[in-house]
Every structure is written in structure tokens, then in C-alpha cells.
Image: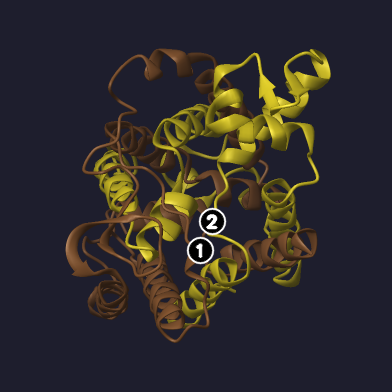
């Protein structure tokens, strides 16, 4: 069953990533240099909709809270985010959109995947170094949500009810998606 | 044709929701490690070993968290790995249905050609270097744009916000400086 779901959900995700323009470095770069926020609005709406459906579904008892999977917060998350951000802007790809762009016909995405495998290998080899620093030590409780979600195994960063907070933040993401202008900077030279 | 952001956002949100409803949140970058492990174990069969306590590896990263990566390496037909392979098929289908890409676009995207010219060598070096830094960063962070930013923030994870802050703090200035006309 999990094999069937892996294939169905994977097919759907790959299809949608290509359809929203995320496999096109043009849309990624225009989002990141703030000249055209089409993809930013898409992503914000996506996060908001998913959040509202998940937390709303949990409150109605339709969604298993145990399916949540919250990753740890540690200094390396921010530093790793900085590195990823630099490479993301340089190449126009992130891991998911890179593999999808390659099969969508973009030949320049194959070197991205090759570099990515080598980068992942470099991390596998240098992991003991990072483990020896405090970069991987949890901060603010590590695996936490912003508020405690009823029935979840994760602690809340605040005392706010996590399910309601999830709904409110989800609505916030949707609102920002609508309020964000099409562009924050003029396209230069055009 | 690229979808309108309202329809595209609804579709994207629906997929992320369905993944959590049916299985677990979406993530991608771990599978780069799993593929390395599969190839590594093929070259050096003692990389991943099984004992009564489960799977482990001579590589500390594959062995961490009770050997869950080592286990995935020894069973390539697992959820996470097949999910990524299926993604690649899904985007291929979408692209073909759209009529595919032009010859120029296949070699290098227009945003790059407008700024750095038509040659593909420079572009390929850039995506290779970009890929290296992206995956090194994603593994240090413990996730990527899918796992941390989208899946994380939809669940109100503190780590998702921390990651997004780092990613945009570097990506926005880099993109502005790199893709500036006449820079």
C-alpha cells in the first residue's frame, strides 16, 4: 500500500511542481530577485491551504495527528538554509525542483543532480565534524511546534493552542499570498 | 502553460495535505543520501550491515538515528525513494503535455541566457556548483525547501521558520546581485 501511495503522491507532486512553474529557473530567479512574485504567491497559498486542511482535519478528527513529523531546530538549520539559499539562487533549482526539471527536459538540471549527490556525499563524510560542534544541538526545545498541538508528541514553543494557531497562521499565509503585489522591484533593463 | 497562482497554490496545498493525511509530510533531499548509500554499498558491500539490532553502517551519517538511512539503503524499494522517482515521472508527463521546451531552453533557462549568454558550459558549471552547495546545506539543515519550508511551516514547526529565514536571507541578495543587468 505504501508503495502505491509513494507512486501516486510522487506523480502528483512532480506534475504540480512542473505546472506551477517551479521547475523553471526563470520563475525561481524572478521570485528571489523580487521582480515577479508569481511563484512566491503560489508557495504561500500552498502552505496556507495545506495548513488549514491539516489542522482543520485534525480538529474534526479526520486527520491522524500522529502523521505529523516535525524536524529539530538547531543552529545548523539556519546555516544550512543560508548555504541552500545561495545555491538555489545560483542554479535556480532546489532538490525537488531540480530532479523534476531534469526529466522535464532541462539538461542543465543533470549537473545540478550530479553536484547534489557529491554535496550530499561531502556531508556524509564531514558529518562527524559537525556532530563535534554545537551546531546540531537543539535550540528552544528542538523538535517543537509554535504551540502545542493536542495529541501530538511535540512540545509547544508557546502556551498557545497549537491547532488553532495552525489555522490562524494558515489563514495568514493565504492572506499574504493575496496581499503580496505581483512585483516588489522593477525588472531591470527591460 | 504555467498555472495561475491561485489554482497552482490550491493544487500544491492539496498535494502537501494529502501526503500528511495518507502517509507523512513530503521531503526530498534525504534521497540524495540514500542514492549515494545504494551506490556506495554496491561498490563496497560492507558499507551497510544488518545485525540482530537492525541496520547500521560504517558511515556515521548513515548509521545515525538508529540506522534509518542504512535501512533505506538496503531496501531501495521504500516509500521515500520511490516517491522521488515518481516525482520525476510526474514532471516529465506535465512537460510533455505542455509540448515540451524549446531547444535553447533545454540547455539553459532564458533568465540565465539573458544575463550570461547562450553558451551552456558556464551554465552547467553553475548548476553543478549550485547543486553541491544546495545539498550540503540541505543535509546540514536536515531538510530542504519541501521538507523544511513547505512541510515544516504548514505544521508550524519552529525549524521550518528558521530554515526559511536562512534560505531567503542568502537567496534574495544572491539573486539580486547575480541577475542584475549590466552588473
Please report, as a chain letter, where disc 1 is located: A
**Residue occupying image coordinates x 64% and y 53%:** A100
Give the image quarter of residue B22: bottom right
Tally of marks: 2
Colour assignment, chain B: yellow
Residue B106 placement (x, y as % from top left): 66, 49
- Are there few (<14), some (14-19), or many (20+) residues within 10 Å of tag 2? many
Q: Which residue is mark 1?
A: A66
Which type of secondary structure does the marked residue at label 2 adopt?
Answer: loop
Whether residue B120 can be seen here: no
**Residue occupying image coordinates x 37% and y 57%:** A30
Q: Say whether residue B100 is left or right of residue A38.
A: right
Frontmost residue, A27 versus A116? A116
Colour assignment, chain A: brown
* Spatial CA span between label 2 and label 1: 35 Å
Please report, as a chain letter, where disc 2 is located: A
Residue at the limit of the structure toward the bottom, as seen here:
A60
Residue B97 placement (x, y as % from top left): 74, 72
Q: Which residue is mark 2?
A: A24
**Residue occupying image coordinates x 31% and y 50%:** B164
Give the label, 2 or 1, closer to the camera.
Answer: 1
Whether residue B11 can be seen here: yes
Amino acid at each position: 500500500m505504501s508503495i502505491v501511495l509513494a507512486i501516486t503522491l510522487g506523480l502528483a507532486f512532480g506534475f504540480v511542481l512542473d505546472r506551477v512553474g517551479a521547475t523553471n529557473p526563470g520563475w525561481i530567479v524572478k521570485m528571489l530577485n523580487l521582480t515577479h512574485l508569481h511563484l512566491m504567491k503560489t508557495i504561500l497559498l500552498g502552505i496556507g491551504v495545506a495548513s488549514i486542511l491539516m489542522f482543520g482535519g485534525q480538529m474534526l478528527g479526520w486527520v491522524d495527528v500522529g502523521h505529523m513529523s516535525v524536524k529539530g531546530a538547531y543552529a545548523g538549520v539556519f546555516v544550512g538554509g543560508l548555504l541552500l539559499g545561495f545555491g538555489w539562487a545560483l542554479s535556480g533549482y532546489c532538490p525537488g525542483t531540480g530532479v523534476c526539471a531534469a526529466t522535464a527536459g532541462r539538461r542543465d538540471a543533470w549537473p545540478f543532480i550530479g553536484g547534489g549527490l557529491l554535496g550530499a556525499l561531502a556531508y556524509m563524510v564531514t558529518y562527524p565534524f559537525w556532530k563535534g560542534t554545537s551546531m546540531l544541538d537543539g535550540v528552544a526545545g528542538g523538535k517543537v511546534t509554535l504551540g502545542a498541538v493536542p495529541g501530538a508528541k511535540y512540545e509547544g514553543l508557546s502556551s498557545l493552542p497549537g491547532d488553532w494557531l495552525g489555522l490562524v497562521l494558515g489563514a495568514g499565509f493565504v492572506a499574504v499570498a493575496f496581499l503580496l503585489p505581483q512585483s516588489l522591484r522593477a525588472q531591470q533593463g527591460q | 502553460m504555467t498555472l495561475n497562482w491561485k489554482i497552482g497554490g490550491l493544487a500544491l496545498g492539496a498535494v502537501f495535505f494529502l501526503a500528511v493525511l495518507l502517509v507523512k509530510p513530503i521531503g526530498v533531499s534525504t534521497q540524495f543520501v540514500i542514492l549515494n548509500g545504494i551506490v556506495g554499498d554496491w561498490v563496497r558491500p560492507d558499507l551497510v550491515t544488518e545485525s540482530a539490532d537492525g541496520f547500521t553502517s560504517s558511515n556515521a551519517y548513515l548509521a545515525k538515528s538508529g540506522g534509518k538511512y542504512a535501512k533505506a539503503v538496503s531496501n531501495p524499494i521504500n516509500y521515500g525513494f520511490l516517491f522521488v522517482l515518481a516525482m520525476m515521472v510526474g514532471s516529465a508527463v506535465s512537460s510533455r503535455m505542455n509540448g515540451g521546451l524549446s531547444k535553447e531552453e533545454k540547455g539553459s533557462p532564458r533568465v540565465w541566457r539573458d544575463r550570461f549568454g547562450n553558451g551552456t558550459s558556464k551554465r552547467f558549471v553553475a548548476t553543478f556548483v549550485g547543486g553541491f552547495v544546495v545539498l550540503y546545506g540541505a543535509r546540514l539543515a536536515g531538510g530542504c525547501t519541501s521538507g523544511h519550508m513547505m512541510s515544516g511551516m504548514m505544521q508550524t514547526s519552529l525549524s521550518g521558520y528558521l530554515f526559511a529565514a536562512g534560505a531567503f536571507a542568502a537567496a534574495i541578495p544572491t539573486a539580486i546581485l547575480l541577475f542584475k543587468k549590466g552588473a
